[in-house]
Image (cartoon, helix red, strand yellow):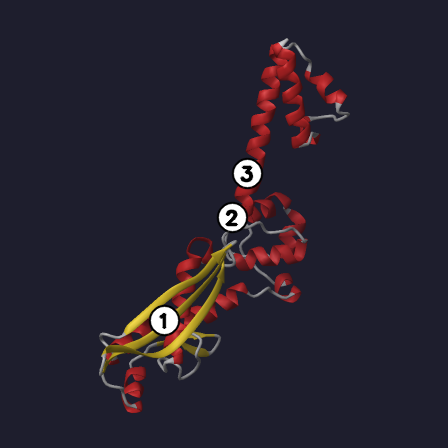
Amino acid sequence: MRTISFSELEKANESIKTTDIKGKEYAEVNQRIKAFRMVYPDGLINTEMVSNENGVCIFKAMVGYYTDEDDGIGIKWLGYGHAYERENSSFINKTSYIENCETSAVGRALGMAGFGIDTSVASYEEVANAIENQMPTIEEANNYVFTFGKYKDELLVNVIDEDDNYIDWLLENSKDTRLLKCIELLTGQQVLTEIEKEERDKKISNRMDMWTEIQQLAMETSTPIEDILDNYKVENTKDLTEEQMQEIIKILKKKKEK
Protein backbone atom coordinates (compact mmCIF):
# COMPACT_ATOMS: atom_id res chain seq x y z
CA MET A 1 0.00 0.00 0.00
CA ARG A 2 1.42 3.37 -1.02
CA THR A 3 2.06 6.39 1.20
CA ILE A 4 -0.66 9.05 0.84
CA SER A 5 -0.06 12.67 -0.04
CA PHE A 6 -0.89 15.61 2.23
CA SER A 7 -3.72 16.65 -0.10
CA GLU A 8 -5.30 13.20 0.27
CA LEU A 9 -5.10 13.51 4.05
CA GLU A 10 -6.69 16.99 3.84
CA LYS A 11 -9.54 15.60 1.74
CA ALA A 12 -10.18 12.82 4.26
CA ASN A 13 -10.18 15.32 7.12
CA GLU A 14 -12.70 17.51 5.30
CA SER A 15 -15.20 14.66 5.59
CA ILE A 16 -14.93 14.61 9.40
CA LYS A 17 -17.90 16.00 11.31
CA THR A 18 -16.95 17.71 14.57
CA THR A 19 -18.84 18.27 17.84
CA ASP A 20 -18.80 21.43 19.92
CA ILE A 21 -17.48 21.54 23.48
CA LYS A 22 -17.52 24.99 25.08
CA GLY A 23 -17.20 26.77 21.74
CA LYS A 24 -14.45 24.57 20.28
CA GLU A 25 -14.92 21.80 17.74
CA TYR A 26 -13.53 18.32 18.36
CA ALA A 27 -13.55 15.23 16.14
CA GLU A 28 -15.19 12.14 17.58
CA VAL A 29 -13.17 8.94 17.40
CA ASN A 30 -15.63 7.25 15.03
CA GLN A 31 -15.18 10.14 12.60
CA ARG A 32 -11.39 9.75 12.74
CA ILE A 33 -11.74 6.01 12.09
CA LYS A 34 -14.02 6.71 9.13
CA ALA A 35 -11.49 9.15 7.63
CA PHE A 36 -8.67 6.67 8.20
CA ARG A 37 -10.62 3.93 6.39
CA MET A 38 -11.25 6.28 3.48
CA VAL A 39 -7.51 6.50 2.94
CA TYR A 40 -6.44 3.07 4.19
CA PRO A 41 -9.35 0.61 3.76
CA ASP A 42 -7.11 -2.25 4.84
CA GLY A 43 -5.13 -0.22 7.35
CA LEU A 44 -4.28 -1.45 10.83
CA ILE A 45 -5.74 -0.22 14.12
CA ASN A 46 -4.12 -2.25 16.87
CA THR A 47 -4.86 -1.87 20.59
CA GLU A 48 -3.13 -3.35 23.62
CA MET A 49 -4.12 -3.20 27.28
CA VAL A 50 -0.90 -2.17 29.02
CA SER A 51 -2.32 -2.69 32.51
CA ASN A 52 -5.56 -2.92 34.48
CA GLU A 53 -4.94 -2.90 38.21
CA ASN A 54 -6.92 -1.51 41.15
CA GLY A 55 -9.51 0.02 38.85
CA VAL A 56 -6.93 1.89 36.74
CA CYS A 57 -6.68 0.97 33.06
CA ILE A 58 -3.97 1.96 30.54
CA PHE A 59 -4.27 1.27 26.81
CA LYS A 60 -1.84 1.66 23.92
CA ALA A 61 -3.03 2.02 20.33
CA MET A 62 -1.13 1.95 17.02
CA VAL A 63 -2.35 2.79 13.51
CA GLY A 64 -0.58 2.00 10.27
CA TYR A 65 -0.67 0.08 6.99
CA TYR A 66 0.94 -2.89 5.25
CA THR A 67 3.92 -2.34 2.94
CA ASP A 68 5.53 -4.51 0.29
CA GLU A 69 9.17 -5.20 1.10
CA ASP A 70 11.86 -7.32 -0.52
CA ASP A 71 11.66 -9.95 2.18
CA GLY A 72 7.86 -9.96 2.44
CA ILE A 73 5.02 -7.83 3.75
CA GLY A 74 5.93 -5.28 6.40
CA ILE A 75 4.05 -2.72 8.45
CA LYS A 76 4.45 1.06 8.46
CA TRP A 77 3.20 2.56 11.71
CA LEU A 78 1.83 6.09 11.39
CA GLY A 79 0.87 7.00 14.93
CA TYR A 80 0.85 5.81 18.53
CA GLY A 81 -1.47 6.81 21.36
CA HIS A 82 -1.92 6.05 25.06
CA ALA A 83 -4.89 6.58 27.37
CA TYR A 84 -5.51 6.25 31.10
CA GLU A 85 -8.90 5.79 32.76
CA ARG A 86 -10.02 5.15 36.32
CA GLU A 87 -13.08 3.06 37.12
CA ASN A 88 -16.00 5.07 38.57
CA SER A 89 -14.33 8.41 37.80
CA SER A 90 -17.28 9.38 35.58
CA PHE A 91 -20.74 8.08 34.70
CA ILE A 92 -19.55 6.15 31.65
CA ASN A 93 -16.54 4.79 33.56
CA LYS A 94 -18.79 3.13 36.15
CA THR A 95 -19.55 0.39 33.63
CA SER A 96 -17.25 0.93 30.62
CA TYR A 97 -13.94 2.38 31.74
CA ILE A 98 -11.97 -0.27 29.81
CA GLU A 99 -13.84 0.36 26.57
CA ASN A 100 -13.62 4.12 27.09
CA CYS A 101 -9.88 3.86 27.64
CA GLU A 102 -9.37 1.84 24.46
CA THR A 103 -11.43 4.32 22.42
CA SER A 104 -9.43 7.28 23.74
CA ALA A 105 -6.13 5.56 22.89
CA VAL A 106 -7.33 4.91 19.32
CA GLY A 107 -8.40 8.53 18.99
CA ARG A 108 -4.98 9.78 20.05
CA ALA A 109 -3.15 7.36 17.74
CA LEU A 110 -5.24 8.52 14.78
CA GLY A 111 -4.62 12.12 15.80
CA MET A 112 -0.88 11.51 15.83
CA ALA A 113 -1.26 10.09 12.32
CA GLY A 114 -2.88 13.35 11.22
CA PHE A 115 -6.56 12.41 11.21
CA GLY A 116 -9.00 14.93 12.71
CA ILE A 117 -6.43 17.34 14.18
CA ASP A 118 -7.54 20.62 12.62
CA THR A 119 -8.56 21.88 16.08
CA SER A 120 -6.94 19.43 18.52
CA VAL A 121 -5.10 16.13 18.80
CA ALA A 122 -7.50 15.28 21.63
CA SER A 123 -10.76 13.66 20.52
CA TYR A 124 -14.26 14.75 21.54
CA GLU A 125 -14.57 11.73 23.87
CA GLU A 126 -11.24 12.47 25.55
CA VAL A 127 -12.09 16.13 26.22
CA ALA A 128 -15.67 15.40 27.34
CA ASN A 129 -14.45 12.79 29.82
CA ALA A 130 -11.73 15.11 31.13
CA ILE A 131 -14.32 17.84 31.76
CA GLU A 132 -16.59 15.42 33.60
CA ASN A 133 -13.69 14.32 35.80
CA GLN A 134 -12.73 17.87 36.78
CA MET A 135 -13.40 18.79 40.40
CA PRO A 136 -15.83 21.75 40.54
CA THR A 137 -14.78 24.94 42.32
CA ILE A 138 -16.48 25.98 45.56
CA GLU A 139 -18.22 28.74 43.60
CA GLU A 140 -19.59 26.24 41.06
CA ALA A 141 -20.78 23.97 43.88
CA ASN A 142 -22.54 26.87 45.65
CA ASN A 143 -24.30 27.79 42.40
CA TYR A 144 -25.31 24.24 41.42
CA VAL A 145 -29.05 24.14 40.62
CA PHE A 146 -31.08 20.93 40.42
CA THR A 147 -32.59 20.23 37.00
CA PHE A 148 -34.57 17.20 38.16
CA GLY A 149 -36.48 15.67 41.07
CA LYS A 150 -38.51 17.21 43.84
CA TYR A 151 -35.98 20.03 44.28
CA LYS A 152 -35.87 21.03 40.63
CA ASP A 153 -34.66 24.65 40.13
CA GLU A 154 -33.42 24.87 43.75
CA LEU A 155 -29.83 25.45 44.84
CA LEU A 156 -27.95 22.40 46.07
CA VAL A 157 -26.52 24.35 49.01
CA ASN A 158 -30.08 25.05 50.26
CA VAL A 159 -31.17 21.43 49.87
CA ILE A 160 -28.14 20.33 51.90
CA ASP A 161 -29.38 22.50 54.79
CA GLU A 162 -33.00 21.37 54.43
CA ASP A 163 -32.99 17.65 53.66
CA ASP A 164 -30.16 15.44 54.94
CA ASN A 165 -32.04 12.28 53.96
CA TYR A 166 -32.29 13.33 50.32
CA ILE A 167 -28.59 14.17 50.17
CA ASP A 168 -27.76 10.77 51.68
CA TRP A 169 -30.00 9.14 49.05
CA LEU A 170 -28.19 11.00 46.26
CA LEU A 171 -24.79 9.96 47.59
CA GLU A 172 -25.94 6.35 47.52
CA ASN A 173 -27.87 6.27 44.24
CA SER A 174 -27.04 9.19 41.93
CA LYS A 175 -24.97 8.54 38.80
CA ASP A 176 -24.38 12.27 38.20
CA THR A 177 -20.64 12.61 38.81
CA ARG A 178 -20.75 16.41 38.76
CA LEU A 179 -23.50 16.54 41.38
CA LEU A 180 -21.74 14.04 43.62
CA LYS A 181 -18.50 16.01 43.49
CA CYS A 182 -20.39 19.21 44.40
CA ILE A 183 -21.97 17.45 47.40
CA GLU A 184 -18.57 16.11 48.45
CA LEU A 185 -17.07 19.59 48.21
CA LEU A 186 -19.87 21.30 50.19
CA THR A 187 -20.39 18.66 52.89
CA GLY A 188 -17.03 16.94 53.23
CA GLN A 189 -18.79 13.58 52.87
CA GLN A 190 -16.83 11.03 50.88
CA VAL A 191 -18.46 9.75 47.70
CA LEU A 192 -17.94 6.00 47.65
CA THR A 193 -17.02 4.20 44.47
CA GLU A 194 -19.01 1.14 43.43
CA ILE A 195 -16.19 -1.09 44.67
CA GLU A 196 -16.18 0.68 48.06
CA LYS A 197 -19.97 0.31 48.27
CA GLU A 198 -19.68 -3.40 47.57
CA GLU A 199 -17.03 -3.78 50.29
CA ARG A 200 -19.19 -1.82 52.76
CA ASP A 201 -22.29 -3.88 51.96
CA LYS A 202 -20.31 -7.09 52.32
CA LYS A 203 -19.06 -5.97 55.71
CA ILE A 204 -22.60 -5.10 56.84
CA SER A 205 -23.85 -8.48 55.61
CA ASN A 206 -21.07 -10.29 57.48
CA ARG A 207 -21.95 -8.47 60.71
CA MET A 208 -25.62 -9.36 60.29
CA ASP A 209 -24.73 -13.01 59.73
CA MET A 210 -22.52 -13.05 62.85
CA TRP A 211 -25.20 -11.41 64.98
CA THR A 212 -27.81 -13.89 63.76
CA GLU A 213 -25.46 -16.71 64.79
CA ILE A 214 -24.88 -15.11 68.20
CA GLN A 215 -28.65 -14.83 68.81
CA GLN A 216 -29.14 -18.48 67.85
CA LEU A 217 -26.29 -19.67 70.09
CA ALA A 218 -27.45 -17.45 72.97
CA MET A 219 -30.91 -19.02 72.79
CA GLU A 220 -29.49 -22.55 72.63
CA THR A 221 -27.22 -21.93 75.65
CA SER A 222 -29.76 -19.86 77.63
CA THR A 223 -27.39 -16.87 77.63
CA PRO A 224 -29.15 -13.49 77.98
CA ILE A 225 -28.15 -11.02 75.27
CA GLU A 226 -28.02 -8.32 77.96
CA ASP A 227 -25.26 -10.24 79.76
CA ILE A 228 -23.22 -10.42 76.58
CA LEU A 229 -23.51 -6.67 76.00
CA ASP A 230 -22.72 -5.92 79.65
CA ASN A 231 -19.63 -8.11 79.50
CA TYR A 232 -18.26 -6.00 76.62
CA LYS A 233 -19.52 -2.76 78.18
CA VAL A 234 -21.61 -1.75 75.17
CA GLU A 235 -25.24 -0.70 74.92
CA ASN A 236 -26.14 -2.32 71.61
CA THR A 237 -24.79 -4.65 68.97
CA LYS A 238 -23.54 -1.94 66.62
CA ASP A 239 -20.89 -1.03 69.21
CA LEU A 240 -19.37 -4.50 69.06
CA THR A 241 -16.33 -4.91 66.82
CA GLU A 242 -16.10 -7.80 64.38
CA GLU A 243 -13.33 -9.30 66.49
CA GLN A 244 -15.56 -9.17 69.59
CA MET A 245 -18.43 -10.81 67.73
CA GLN A 246 -16.14 -13.59 66.53
CA GLU A 247 -14.95 -14.07 70.10
CA ILE A 248 -18.56 -14.26 71.39
CA ILE A 249 -19.42 -16.91 68.81
CA LYS A 250 -16.38 -18.94 69.84
CA ILE A 251 -17.28 -18.72 73.54
CA LEU A 252 -20.94 -19.63 72.97
CA LYS A 253 -19.99 -22.61 70.80
CA LYS A 254 -17.76 -23.96 73.57
CA LYS A 255 -20.56 -23.42 76.09
CA LYS A 256 -22.95 -25.31 73.82
CA GLU A 257 -20.56 -28.28 73.57
CA LYS A 258 -20.40 -28.75 77.37
Viewer can see residue 183: yes
Mark 2 crowdedness (10 Å alpha carbons): few <14, some 14-19, many ≥20: some
Residue to which mark 1 is pinned: 29
Q: Earlier in the sequence, mark 3 or mark 1?
A: 1
Viewer can see residue 91: no
Along the line of sight, which residue is nearer the eye, 90 or 98? 98
Q: Position of residue 111 (x, y in %)?
A: 39, 78
Q: For this view, does 219 lie left or right of residue 55?
A: right
Q: What is the number of the mark on residue 113?
A: none
Q: Secondary structure at mark 3?
A: helix
Q: Position of residue 118 (x, y in %)?
A: 40, 84
Q: Which image quarter: residue 235? A: top right
Quadrant of the snapshot with the N terminus: bottom left
Q: Residue at x 64, y 16 (%)?
A: 252
Q: Secondary structure at mark 2?
A: helix
Whether label 1 touches label 2, CB < 8 Å:
no
Q: Position of residue 123 (x, y in %)?
A: 42, 73
Distance CA(mark 3)–CA(mark 2): 10 Å
Whether label 3 touches label 2, CB < 8 Å:
no
Along the line of sight, which residue is nearer the eye, 170 or 148? 170
Amino acid under label 2?
Glu
Distance CA(mark 1)–CA(mark 2): 28 Å
Amino acid under label 1?
Val
Q: Position of residue 41 (x, y in %)?
A: 22, 75
Amino acid under label 3?
Asp
Residue to which mark 2 is pinned: 194
Mark 3 crowdedness (10 Å alpha carbons): few <14, some 14-19, many ≥20: few
Q: For this view, does 37 lie left or right of residue 258?
A: left
Q: Earlier in the sequence, mark 1 or mark 2?
A: 1
Residue to which mark 3 is pinned: 201
Count of number-bearing discs: 3
